[in-house]
Image (cartoon, coloured by chain):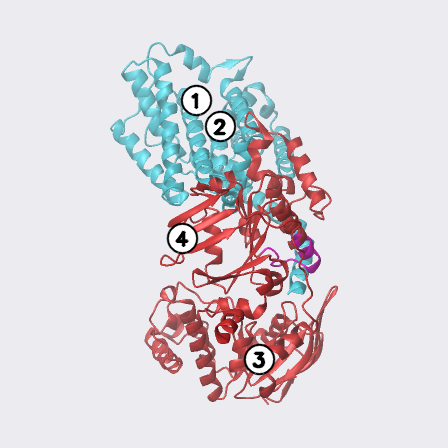
Amino acid sequence: MGRKELGLAALIVGIAAITAGLNPQFLSTVNLMNMANLIGLFGIFSIGQGLIIITGGIDLSVGSIFALLGVVFLDLTANMGIAWPFAVLVVLALGLLMGLVHGLLVTRLGLQPFVVTLCGLLIYRGAARYYTGDSTISLGYAEGLDAITWLAAGRSYGVPHSFLALILVAIVVGVVLHRSVFGRYLFAVGRNEEAARYSGIRTGAVVTGAYVLGGLLAGISTLLLVFYTSSVSPSSFGNFYELYAIAAAVLGGCSLRGGEGSVLGIVLGTVLLQVLQNLVNILGIPSSLNFAVMGGVILIGALADRQLARRKSAPARMAAKGAAVAAE
Amino acid sequence: MLLELEGIGKSYPGVRALDGVSLHLEAGEVLGLVGENGAGKSTLMKVLGGVVRPDAGRIRLHGRDFPQLSIAEAGAQGIAFVHQELSVFDNLDVAANVLMGREPVWGGPLRLVDRRAARAEVAPLLARLGADFGPEAPVATLSIAQRQMVEIARALSMRARIIIFDEPTSSLTLSETDRLLATIAALREAGTGIIYISHRLGEITTCADRVTCLRDGRVVGHLARGEINHATMTRLMIGRDLKSLYTPPAAAPREEGGLRIEALVTEAFPDRSIDLALRPGEILGLAGLVGAGRTSLARALFGVEPALAGGISLGGRELRIGSPREAIAEGIYLVPEDRKRSGLVLDMTIAENVSLPDLAGHARAGLVSGGSEVRVAEAQRQSLRIRAPGVAVRAGTLSGGNQQKVVLGKWLAMRPRALIFDEPTRGVDVGAKGEIYALMRGLADRGVAVLMISSDMEEVIGVSDRVAVMHEGRIAGTLARHEVNEPNILRLATGQQPEQHMATVEAE
């Protein structure tokens, strides 16, 4: 565990302790499992977002991807009666494809990630609304979905499956990011694209890979979210979720300059965000203040991090400056 | 007397950058300032510009004494700089650049820029300099020589009485250099005092009225107009005979099996082609002026900017190199000019940097083996004598010489067949330089073909077995070891024939 993760974990424990002190209900099994469910739902696509941020990019389109893939999935299963495994494959494949398109637009055509995914945000949201004529589709009485409903929204030993899914995804992506060749390339490209290219790395393919993985994780998240809400209203489903993901990744130590971050950090960032949301509810703070609390905590976190980093590097920087001047 | 420096001293921890430096400058004269890299020229100019505060001495400007200058005072006293790295805003037009910070305004409190007045103010300055562009031209469309003109116009607009040119011609072509020297002569006629810093002694001979020479932070000589020539300046600058760095190869380089470049056309010079043969076991120096196309050649060989036409073959096999990845697969490696940008990921550790080009070789089933990585990096750290407590240290914390060794370690841990060094010792201290030269020689003796691009004459002459000289996109000539000397290299670099050839021509 790095310095950032430790700090984050300490912050979570501190906030949880205070909240529990003010309202013991915070530690009730029901509340904890509800939180775990939300952490699972938000954590998976936040990890995808983190991968993209590590390349120096950003993905603003995830919320709209949920809406579009959500209506596609419900239309296939509830309206057309297509078998769910097939519908699941379609959703995952579409998620992959969207990530691939984003990645190619960024690496091959040199568009800025912000612009590419902002267009994605607008296009997918519009497509989702047009697809259903702006009306809500719900699971309703669709047949033969028991198995997947249990898989996506069920619980084992009281633990929500979404949370278990997050743990599984975190382990797999954690190994990929922190132990594999691809993960090392991702950090190298995010830190210094040119030096990575000069070391023979296919930097375009690496960056595209991150977007593809992000798209796949967005597809998985869509399925979990659909069974969590059991209906999709295309104009509001997944609204602002890209911002939750960016917030979790940044809280978790991903730098928007790229090349920095960890899966554990992103998961902890998601946990902190959900604890804050829960705190607002459980302490009876007006829920309209929800976003303001979140923003305030992220700002304080960023400030604290900046101060710590400055204090740590100040002596080194002074020494380096002296040496550089002397060398001239 | 326009400017008088007396006993200027400046020390940094462990280094005496300036030690009792005195010089003076009259109105209407050009003072040439020469000295090797690290002799203290830059520090002295920073003192004049108000960037560095001297520890000792005084600065007398127009008869007024200053113990030190601030940046604002330097400007107010009419000192202006034309830098080696141009400091223009290329997203703005010429008038905006010339008047940056002093824009004519209208509209009272709104302080809107009066574009018409700005252009009217700048146009006569450009006319005086004989510029072929107007005040409304966007700087992005100008050549480097024209941008320099913009900087000179800025100096004029500030009514500068002292203009300091710091290596102004390092990126100019010869005809552009001639025009700049003519401009400087015109400024001198108009009564401006000029300090001209250059490594190009020929330019100093042409334009300077007097020369002051620095060595190791001290003034080692003043030359009057009649004494200015190549030989005296060189003797003063070096203060000793060029010491021999040269170590001959262990065995004569083999003729076959090296890197052959045939009719190669690079992006920088689409109408020129390059032929060059690099033998295994030799160090071939590649000299030439900045902009002669040496780095473009290196980038083409390494696949960064693939060649437009022509052939590259290694060991007799024709190669197609479209990316660094393909070059690396063939054993052609590059130690790039800008190691911080292209050579290293500064935030990664030594081990992670060393393993980066060969990471698949350190991995099983796609997962990196930290042990194998650290073992290989540790072996490189010891054999290259990288001064760091371990290989888990971030590369960015190392000194220039040790960073360069990490870049080398990346390639030495693999199987080099041809290694291209682009300015291998830039920003590297003297001790580490010697070690890097020894490593290059060791590589050559292992049968690697070594190409060394360098602008450091001492290095080119001291290290190379042969020297190829580039001039405006082509190889102007190749000198064998016994022909390698500074005059010959300079002649080829400026498009003339080397002395021996001329001598034989004359003898016939």
**In the structure shown, which secondary structural element does the residue marked by tag 2 occupy?**
helix
User: Which three-letter amino acid code belongs to the residue tagged 2?
Assistant: Ile
Which residue position holds label 2? A44
> Where residue A68 appears, x then y in whole percent?
33, 29
Q: Do tags 2 and 1 sit on the same chain?
A: yes
Q: Label 4 neighbourhood size at 10 Å, few (<14), some (14-19), many (20+)?
A: some
- Over which residues does the magenta segment extend? B424-437
Q: Is residue B216 left or right of residue B505?
A: right
Q: Quadrant of residue A207?
A: top left
Secondary element under disc 3, as helix, strand or loop, is: strand
Element assignment for label 1: helix
Residue drawn at x 56%, y 29% is: A174
Q: Are marks 2 and 1 in contact (CB under 8 Å)?
A: yes
- Between marks 4 and 3, how big is the CA–CA gap? 41 Å
Task: Give the labeled residue for mark 1.
Answer: A224
Query: If the image is split into quadrants, where does the N terminus of chain B sit?
Result: bottom right
Label placed on residue B263: 4
